[in-house]
Amino acid sequence: MLYQVYETQRTLMEPFVDFAQAAAKLYSSSSSPIAQNPFVQRMAAGYELIYRLGKDYERPVFGIQSIVNGEVEIAVHERIEIDKPFCELRRFKRFTDDSATLDHLKDQPAVLIVAPLSGHYATLLRDTVKTMLKDHKVYITDWKNARLVPLSEGTFHLDDYVNYVQEFIRHLQGKYGNCHVISVCQPTVPVFAAISLMASRGETTPLSMTMMGGPIDARKSPTAVNNLAMTKPYSWFENNVIYRVPSNFAGAGRRVYPGFLQHTGFVAMNPSNHAKSHFDFFKDLVKGDDASAEMHRKFYDEYNAVLDMDAEYYLETIDVVFQKYKLVNGTWDVKSLSGELERVIPGDIKTTRVMTVEGELDDISGSGQTEAALDMCTGVPTGHKRHFEAKGAGHYGIFSGRRWREQVYPAVKAFILEASKSVNKPAAAAKPVVKASAKTVAKTAVKTAVKTAVKRAPAKAARSK
């Protein structure tokens, strides 16, 4: 019922919001004879503030049309590579007429950026994408607003998220031989699971996996966000934050965690900061500081644009990540596309290099939560594991803004380049495998089968219950 009440209120407010927008334009127009009057300027600023506080924020666009590499401007074309019911895999393809630059671009590594499905759209990582496009072939997961997905597409589970990530990784591997994966915040957990499962099956895993500011082990340095998920019982979330999509949307009837509730939670974390920001915006408009006013608009166009999440996915994330800690406890079973339950075993990852990134002042994913992944990757050589802490950076600073560009990105770029170069080195172990006798090969196969059976025993036991 709350969702319907919210939509009704928004619909009733729409004429007043439109009026405020029109009045703001009228009073601030340079052609208006009264526009220079200080009182009129205040009226125009007030009306624009009312408009921005009451308007409906739609999904922003990435808007990356070109990048500059050295002295060469490179055109960027955004397109959908794979269209799934709940997600689009977007590619940012680069074009140039400069032959030397084109040859250089062809040799650059392919990177899959897995964006968070936690309330905001993937465009929140616009700066991440734009920065990485200078040195990489970039793809990103663009999650869809669940209220726009028809019920006929079924529900979306955390297991589906894991399977989506694996499909996208295989797609890039099919095109480029292999790829690198970067996960930001929430997806660190399902991405870690996806690559662990691929390793357990003996599939080729990505060359590198970079996890940034995510709740791998939410028990460490819990934040206000963690505490809410950890202290409230599972039933509380199901009874208090899950609602059905109203009839005026394509996904009518779908159970979701509404974006407007998520947004309310974001604002409630720092209400005084947001109030000050809006008042500063009003003063900037009165002063005629267009640059500062435009920065405010751009930030809140992104911050206020939120999406609904399918209820099953949201509730399972609460259960798996924040209440039962199934990943770190080694008790997480994921259902594959074939319907088989598979145990997530990070220790099976052997050939993927692992990097964790944390912000010194992160108030969403606390210190040590992401770094915990390194200890779980017992099969990865110590020299292939790395941790980076961005000094002075909060949560958003590790993937957007000056600290991302000046501190974090150079470290991530070097890590990916190092992993890419390691592929071109000749494998010394290749010769003995070719010369091995049939008897040796048979013994190895038996040992591998026994090892796999032992690892899968917990999953089979869970299915039999």
Image (tube, rainbow, N blue to C red):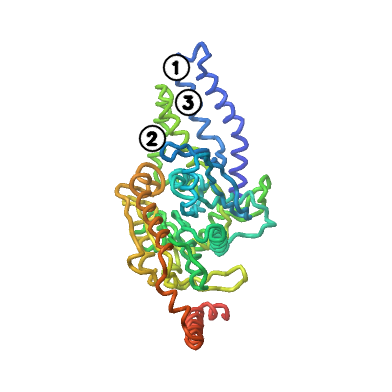
Which residue matches tag 2?
276
Question: Pointers 1 and 3 in contact (CB under 8 A)?
Answer: no
Q: Residue placed farthest to the bottom in the image?
A: 439
What amino acid type should be assigned to the residue bearing mark 2?
Answer: Lys
> Residue at 65% of width from left, 48% of height from top?
246
Which residue matches tag 3?
46
The kind of secondary structure element at disc 3 is: helix
Residue 384 in the image, given as x and y percentages of width and height = 36, 64
Which residue matches tag 1?
39
Of marks 1 and 3, which one's residue comes earlier in the chain? 1
What amino acid type should be assigned to the residue bearing mark 3?
Answer: Gly
> Which image quarter holds the C terminus?
bottom right
Name above or below for residue 443 compared with residue 434. below
Q: For this rendering, which residue is in front, 311 or 129?
A: 129
Q: For this rendering, which residue is in front, 252 or 420?
A: 420
Residue 112 in the image, given as x and y percentages of width and height = 50, 55
Q: For this rendering, which residue is in front, 61 or 50?
A: 61
